[in-house]
Amino acid sequence: MTTTTTLRPTDLRSLRDAVLDTAGTIAIAGAGTAADWAGPLAPVDAVLDTTGLRGVITHNPGDMTVSVRAGTPLRELQRELAPHGQHVSFDAARVADGATVGGLIATADAGPAALVHGSMRDLVIGVTIVLADGTVARSGGHVIKNVAGYDLAKLLHGSYGTLGVLAEVVLRLHPVPRRTATIAVGCSLEEAAAHAATVLGGPYEPAALEWTSDGTLLIRVEGTEGAIDARRARLRAALGTGEVRPPGDDGWERHAELVRGTSDLAVLRIGVRPSRLPAVLADLPARSVTAGLGTGVATVGLPPEAVAGAHERVHTAGGTSVLRSRPAEAEVPAWGPPPSAIAVLRAVKAELDPQNRFGRGRFDPWM
């Protein structure tokens, strides 16, 4: 019986030592909120627990940037930034579960706020990583060493722990909104698409725009105390409908529940051109849906036997899809047909991790 070693470094030096002193394959683990995402991890010789890499390194309120260790839970970082009236404009559902900064980058997660601020790849302005051979590389900010000219922050985004270990991250910050309000519109997906076209095509500047399979379109607006009432009144007038939801009962918690899924369904995250999203979703036998009608990103709960067909449908629409969770013991494909850039992905893997030490199985069967 093979014993798996668990390593828990607490700073950059001990992280590098852990990689250098470990022979064989390594799994990179954070808070565990996305342990089942993508392909099942193959057996490994060691697990590298990044949760010891914790805490703020430098916060520059004037520049609105923060440097933080990658194992820091984002919710803890938000609490530390709050007294300065700043935050990371990022609201993926699993942040509330303790997801770490590094884990959110590695899984390319995002929430409704991506409509305005994008995903973590748009908020990261610098990273420090450790490669499989122990090389410490930095990109963005004060560059000490680049690796063959790669933009490491973008490479690590969505890499699922297969290219390197995130040690430190520099993030762009934004002011905390003075006030927010949510307008909920009961409607079908087809009706929601028409409402979304009205909102996105006018001067309404929604902070988030999501439809859920409960039959509700949620529109969040942000602004100053004096402006928010007028903004939501204009929005309701443009739509001809809409209920102003009170804080705490505005529908976003239900949205987060649907994103997390249930134990009897496979959960798939898909991304297509926003104009194509309603048609793609209409073709899927989804039991639950959250749909970003402005971003083109949706999370769907499906019977396990429908996952392969869903991957094919998304691929045909020119999109991407990845499995987020699966029922216990269900064998379902994590990925659909390989993208046109698969040769580039394999080449990057061969360059940064030629011995395939990190994250074996996560991108099966692509590589």
Image (cartoon, helix red, strand yellow):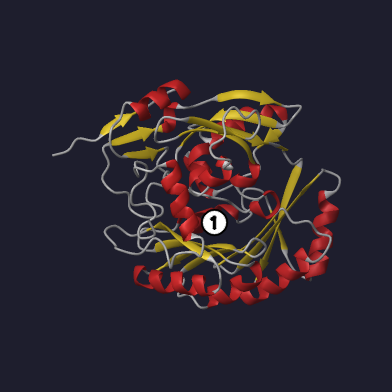
* Residue 141 place in picture, x, y as percent: 66, 31
Q: Identify which residue, 69 or 193, lies in the foreground.
A: 69
Local packing at callout 1 (Cα closer than 10 Å; few below 14, some 14-19, many 20+) is some
Q: Secondary structure at mark 1?
A: helix
* Residue 31 place in picture, x, y as percent: 42, 38
- Number of residue marks: 1
Left or right of residue 18: residue 121: right
Which quarter of the figure has residue 67?
A: top right
* Residue 152 place in picture, x, y as percent: 55, 41
> Is residue 268 placed above or below 177 in the rendered structure?
below
Which quarter of the figure has residue 29?
A: top left
Q: Identify which residue, 99 or 165, lies in the foreground.
A: 165
Residue 96 appears in the figure: yes
> Is residue 88 placed above or below 328 in the rendered structure?
above
* Quadrant where the N terminus is found in the figure: top left
Q: Residue at x 75, y 44 (%)?
A: 179
Residue 168 appears in the figure: no
Q: Residue furthest left?
A: 1
Which quarter of the figure has residue 195?
A: bottom right
> Is residue 252 placed above or below 53 in the rendered structure?
below
Q: Identify which residue, 361 or 218, lies in the foreground.
A: 361
Q: Residue furthest front?
A: 148
In the image, what residue type sits under mark 1?
Answer: Arg
Q: Residue at x 53, y 25 (%)?
A: 55
* Residue 358 place in picture, x, y as percent: 37, 42
> Is residue 11 placed above or below 183 in the rendered structure?
above
* Residue at image mark 1: 254
Left or right of residue 264: residue 237: right
Q: Identify which residue, 160 or 302, lies in the foreground.
A: 160
Left or right of residue 10: residue 116: right
Q: Residue at x 33, y 53 (%)?
A: 40
Q: Residue at x 42, y 32 (%)?
A: 50
